[in-house]
Amino acid sequence: DLHKAIRRQRQLGIRDRVTVTLPTGWRAAGTGWAGQYGDDGDLEPALVVSPDPARWAVDPSVPGAFVGLSASIARRTDAEGFVAERPHADCVAAPVRRTRLGGVDWVVAGYACPRGRPVIVEAAGTTPAGLLYVQVVPPPGGGSAFVDALLAGVRVRPPG
C-alpha cells in the first residue's frame, strides 16, 4: 500500500543520512528523533544502536546509543550549548572534553550515575547537515576508548 511505501522510503532515508560503524554484536534500528521535526515536517533522522535496540530505551542494563541529526537544533544552539542542556542531576559529571573524531569536532560530557544507567555520555558536534547528537551508554568497562571508537564511526551524508 502507498502509506507503507512512503514509511519505508522515510526509514531508508533516515538510515541513509546517519550511519554508524557498529561494535561487534551490535545492531542498528532506524527511527526518527521524537519531537524534532525538519523543515519538511518529517521527524529528523536518528538511529538507536545496541546489542538489543528494542530493549535499550527501557532497560538500563543494556548498553547502546542514540544517534540523531537535527538542522533545527543547529539553528538554535551549538554543540557546547546542547550538551550543557543535558545535565543528569543525580549523577557525578566528569570534566567536559573536546575531541575531533570521524571529521567531527565533538563536545563530550560523561556522567557516573548511582541509579538507572551507570554511565551516560552526552556528545554533540556540528556538521554541515546540522547538529549531530550521540548519547552513549557504554558496556561495562567500555570507558572513553569505547565512546571514542563509536564517535569515530558516526557519519552524516548530505541530503539529496
Image: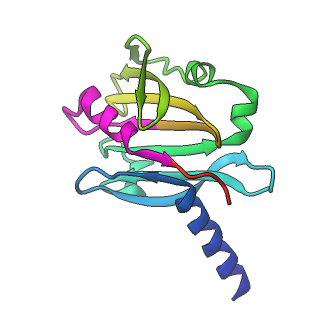
User: Residue 5: horizontal and vertical position, in percent?
Assistant: 66, 81
Q: Quadrant of the N terminus?
A: bottom right
- Quick check: 137 above or below 42? above
User: Residue 148: horizontal and vertical position, in percent?
Assistant: 33, 32
**Picture quarter containing residue 152?**
top left
Left or right: 135 in relation to 68? left
Residue ranking furthest to the bottom: 1
Left or right: 44 in relation to 15? right
Q: Based on the picture, tell me whether residue 81 belongs to the magenta stretch.
A: no
Left or right: 89 in relation to 13? left
Count of marks, rendered view: 0
How has the structure been colored for display? Answer: rainbow
Residue at coordinates 65% horizontally, 67% vertically from top-left?
10
Residue at coordinates 81% horizontally, 50% vertically from top-left?
39
Q: Quadrant of the C terminus?
A: bottom right
**Picture quarter containing residue 91?**
top left
User: Residue 153: horizontal and vertical position, in percent?
Assistant: 38, 44
Q: Based on the picture, tell me whether residue 137 belongs to the magenta stretch.
A: yes
Residue at coordinates 75% horizontally, 49% vertically from top-left?
38
Q: Which residues are magenta?
A: 135-155
User: Residue 109: horizontal and vertical position, in percent?
Assistant: 44, 21
Residue ranking furthest to the top: 95
Residue at coordinates 44% horizontally, 23% vertically from top-left?
108
Left or right: 40 in relation to 104? right
